[in-house]
Amino acid sequence: MAEKFLFILLPYLSAAVFLIGVLYRFWVWGRTPVPLRIVTTPAPRTRGGVIWRLIGDALWFPSLFKGDRFLWAAGLAFHILLWLVLLRHLRYFLYPVPGWVEGIQTLGLYAGYLIPIPLALLFARRLADEKVLYVSILGDYFSLFLILAITLSGTLLRVFFRTYLVEVKAYALSLVHLQPVIPQVHWLFGLHFFLVLVLLIYFPFSKLMHSGGLFWSPTRNQRANFETRFVNPWDFPVAYNPRNLWPPEKYHQALTESKEGKKE
Ligand code: HEM
């Protein structure tokens, strides 16, 4: 029963939560009105330039590089290693395994061994810097520890508690082809896999959405076409618009009242 839940029901459920959740968040961000230019300058003037800048942002975090060199180094190291690990895992889901996936196997393996280092640095940073500690929430630690638990269970699976990988691959392919079977595997694989599914479910609700949110950020995805006049289609909120705070009618009324007061 528990096996059926873990290996058959939960994988599809978490894939659905992940996909629908991520698309829903994109949809909400996509229909949030952004009537004014709030792009960070210097900014590209063309759409092609914007795409180029976003690709750069996603690949090597240049703003972070300017803002916080330590966070940039640890963050970039973590993301590169994670990508290598994920690409190495494609061998379970693809048949036949493409040459380039075969080619990065060793690199991906060592990346998995190294990942705990940037994770530990990112965690230490939250504790060491008083300001960062103050703004850290439970979710920040949860993400770090969940990913750490996934990589540690994976590494233990690789090094100490070997499971039969042919069975793992048959199971992964059965999932992909929508004909899931319950695999005969080491319990540690069950744990490794379960933690990954927890991550999938947690992802759309978490700050990990920054990975997709980047592309919806108006400060990064707008052009610097400041020569165009942007008029807010609805009125400004009170605090920013003196007309709302002190509309002309009210002003005139006050003026007349004060004049009349003087006369008296
Ligand atoms: C966020 C997703 C995942 C991360 C970060 C992750 C991480 C890791 C790491 C670091 C290792 C040890 C190094 C290696 O052999 O590559 C590993 C091993 C392993 N992972 Fe994952 N993993 C993830 C998802 C999965 C999934 C979805 C499966 C299901 C097929 C899986 C199956 C395995 C297996 C079977 C091993 C042992 C490999 C061996 O013995 O050679 N992992 N994982």
Image: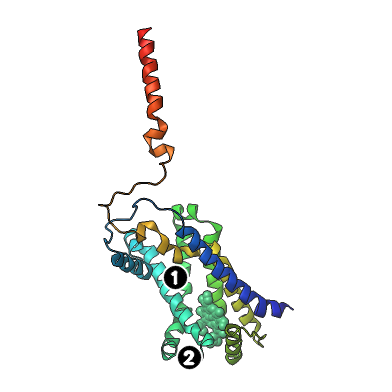
Of circles 2 and 1, the one toward us is 2
Q: What separation in Å lies between label 2 and label 1 (alpha carbons)?
A: 29 Å
State the image quarter where residue 210 is shown: bottom left
Residue furthest out toward the left? 227
Indicate the position of residue 184 as horizontal and vertical percent values. 67, 88
Foreground: 110 or 255? Answer: 255
Quarter of the image where the C terminus is located = top left
Q: Which mark is residue 97?
A: 2
Q: Secondary structure at mark 1?
A: helix
Question: Which residue carries the number 1 mark?
Answer: 118
State the image quarter where residue 46 is shown: bottom left
Q: Which mark is residue 262?
A: none
Indicate the position of residue 245 as horizontal and vertical percent values. 41, 32
In this view, 41 is above or below 50 = above
Quarter of the image where the N terminus is located = bottom right
Residue furthest out toward the top? 264
State the image quarter where residue 166 is shown: bottom right
